[in-house]
Amino acid sequence: MREGKIGVAILGLGTVGQGVVEILSKNRAMICNRSGIDLELKKVLVRNLNKKRDIELLPEIYAQDYNEILQDKNINIVVELMGGLNPAKEYIEAALKAKKAVVTANKAVLANYAPELFALAREENVPLYYEASVGGGIPLIGPLNESLVGNNIKSVMGIINGTTNYILTKMSKEGRSFQDVLAEAKALGYAEADPSADIDGLDAAHKLTVLIALAFDTYIGLADIDTEGIRNIDILDISFAKNFGYAIKLLAIGKKTDSGIEAGVHPTLIPLNHPLAAVNDVYNAVFVNSMEVGELMFFGRGAGRYPTASAVVGDIVAAGRVISGSGKSLPRKFTTGKTKPISETSGSFYIRLMVADRPGVLGEIAAILGQNGVSVASVIQEGRDQDRVPLVFVTHEVNQGNLARSLQTIASLSCVKEVANVIRVERGY
Ligand SMILES: NC(=O)c1ccc[n+]([C@@H]2O[C@H](COP(=O)([O-])OP(=O)(O)OC[C@H]3O[C@@H](n4cnc5c(N)ncnc54)[C@H](OP(=O)(O)O)[C@@H]3O)[C@@H](O)[C@H]2O)c1
């Protein structure tokens, strides 16, 4: 087992590159404690030393000549975050030939050159990892490669382009036209100045080649993926689809059938009660159906600096484990701890009281809640001319100790017959 630091070089200091540098430096000790891998950033390859960036590095970290990285024996992992086909492909090949592990987020390079790059990595016996290439921050490649390695996968179906999902979601929720929402997406930075790779389905097709290769052990080239984007979707289509009980999503689908593999990226009607129909805005999700585990869904942020960097860092650590010879099996180190007392925690609550149906009850109860710092978001008072009527509150975020104290006082009021139920409200974020 190799002891000591694992040297890392990053190629390209753009959106994702800067996120990776930040996570590696801020979380270095935590990563080392969890994995036993001490990652040291040795070099960052940039084209322009004077470009203004969000982070600053020591001058000796910057490199402008890739050979400096290739020849440095203390660099064990090369992280390609430049994007594009060339020189990304050549740089990945050169790193593998120099026996350096490679981590990349580059779906375009994989969609075009996966067979030769994977063959080279096998030949050189060095890791080539690419978690961030599909679904950004969603752990998807790792599970397909490892946890699900014993599964026969029947289909993979996903929303794997955030820009088009954002546009379709806005069109559907706000009844706005494709052109109108696209203009807004550009202004917000969700769509590029030239958005064609996203809206014409090419980006999703790139990612589908990667998913299919993993799911079916078969590389299908881009030319064989039937690809259609969302330019022709009208709000009328979305509204009719809704009436029939469907959402329209840009789905990338790979299916293994007895007569071969089907692969396509198309706008697709999907039943409103299917989990993919509820995946909105820039979120991504991939639905996997296998003979053994059945249906699984992976959901999360498919792009963005930190989500994508999170996946890249996971790959760097995985590569570090291989290089150090520690494998994946080192048990995690834990300290023992205690939970925070429940009275110190806070939350929002639904409270149903059964009270006497007479004037002034609501005021009495509201006063007690107010004295204890419990603020109410909504109230429903129902029923008349009965001995016991429900009085229901939903609170804002409140301290549980304060809530318990106020309920104790409320329970002792003569007008309160019963504190019938107190249920936690989880807003889902
Ligand atoms: N952004 C995301 O949310 C996301 C999500 C998933 C996957 N990815 C993938 O991650 C990769 C990086 O994306 P990004 O968004 O970080 O792109 P980006 O912001 O455009 O950054 C790329 C950086 O690489 C630099 N670069 C390009 N060619 C270079 C070369 N020959 N030598 C040195 N530096 C070079 C660029 O330098 P200049 O500034 O001089 O042009 C730029 O700073 C791409 O493959 C992308 O598909 C991105």
Image (cartoon, rainbow, N blue to C red):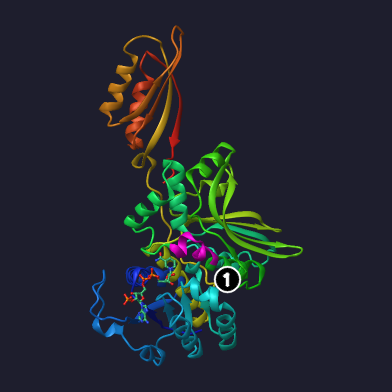
Report crowding for label 1: few under 14, some 14 to 19, many 20 or more residues within 10 A (C-alpha): some
Q: Position of residue 144 (x, y in %)?
A: 59, 65
Q: Residue at x 38, y 49 (%)?
A: 180
Q: Nearer the viewer, residue 356 or 113?
A: 113
Q: Nearer the viewer, residue 269 or 72?
A: 269
User: Based on the displayed image, in which of its 4 quarters is residue 14 positioned?
Assistant: bottom left
| Frontmost residue, 203 versus 230 | 230
Q: Residue furthest right?
A: 258
Residue 325 relative to residue 360: left or right? right
Whether residue 268 sits left or right of residue 350 in the image: it is right
Quadrant position of ligand 1: bottom left
Residue at 39% across, 59% down: 191
Give the amino acid at mark 1: Leu
Image height check: is 343 above or below 149?
Answer: above
Q: Which residues are magenta?
A: 196-205
- Compared with 411, 147 (above or below) is below
Q: Which x, y percent locates residue 237?
A: 53, 44
Examine the structure image and report whether residue 373 is included in the region drawn in magenta: no
Would you name the residue on which mark 1 appears? 222
Q: Is residue 276 left or right of residue 341?
A: right
Residue beneath the point at 35% across and 68% down: 15
User: Can the viewer see residue 291?
Assistant: yes
Residue 334 visible from this viewpoint = no
Dominant SS type (magenta): helix
Badge 1 element = helix
Residue for point 48% across, 55% down: 231
Estimate the x, y position of residue 59 in percent, counting from the top left: 24, 83
Against 390, is 188 above or below?
Answer: below
